[in-house]
Image: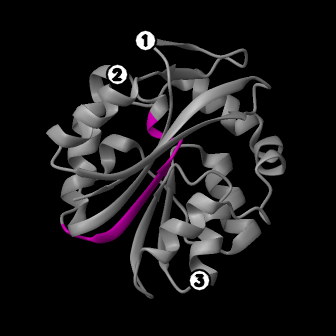
Amino acid sequence: MSPDKRTLAVYDAKAEDYAALFHDAKEGKDLRAFIAGLPRGARVMDLGCGPGAASAHMMRAGLDPDPVDASPAMVALARSRFGLPARLARFDEIDTTATYDGVWANFSLLHAPRAELAQHLARLHRALKPGGRLHLGMKLGKGEGRDALGRFYAYYSEDELTEHLARAGFSVASRRTGTEKGLAGTNDPYIILIAHA
């Protein structure tokens, strides 16, 4: 299924604002832990790479990132700012088997309809090598809706996400919750889950 056009239009129009908000120099504890959990040279899919800051940190740490995004403006930024091999791809175009040591899906799959999450997680499980590491960042809540900017979101409880991951074949290794201010200016509850294929 095609990505939500209104959501993509927001990211295309606000790519520079998004890059400034989540500044390239910021390497958070979640990304550091993800990198530390992978061997040097590990192949990593950065699913919904945005302006490419996470992939740039991975590359500098000796990993081999594959940054993908459905927003042409975000892909262009990732290429121009960091010289990354970023490419256009939708969630439903991930079609590879045992290719990646890790998948960094940091607040990207929350833009997929709830009815599609199971198939996206199954694709990621198939794309990972056995024992591969998944970082999944999602917003907590119920149902689906749009934010003040018009972006589409699907919300989940911790239990729902854990069940989805288990059904896709993942084993959850750790989780943490928090709140953070996003592009729309609201403080939203979120969860970070680390799981293994």
Where is residue 58 drawn, in percent x and y? 57, 74
Horizontally, residue 175 falls left or right of residue 13, namely left
Specify the label residue 143 is tagged with: 1
Q: Residues within 10 Å of mark 1 (few under 14, many from 20)?
A: few
Q: Which residue is mark 2?
A: 114
* Viewer-proximal residue among 59 and 157: 157
Q: Is residue 28 visible?
A: yes
Give the number of the mark in front: 2 or 1. Answer: 1
Q: Say which quadrant the C terminus sits in.
A: bottom left
Does 106 lie within the magenta span? yes
Q: Is residue 65 above or below residue 117?
A: below
To which quarter of the image does residue 161 belong? top left
Crowd around label 2: few <14 · some 14–19 · many ≥20 (10 Å): some
Residue at coordinates 22% horizontally, 68% vertically from top-left?
131
**Residue at label 3?**
61
Amino acid type at circle 1 is Gly
Residue at the image position 63 percent from the left and 82 percent from the top: 60
The amino acid marked with disc number 3 is Ala
- Counting residues from the start of the chain, the first of labels 2 and 3 encountered is 3
Q: Secondary structure at mark 3?
A: loop
Q: Residue 194 appears at what percent x and percent y?
A: 39, 54
Q: Quadrant of residue 100?
A: bottom left
Which is nearer the N-term, disc 2 or disc 1? 2
Magenta-tinted stretch: 98-109
Q: Are marks 2 and 1 in contact (CB under 8 Å)?
A: yes
**In whole angstroms, how far apart are the C-alphas of marks 2 and 1?**
8 Å
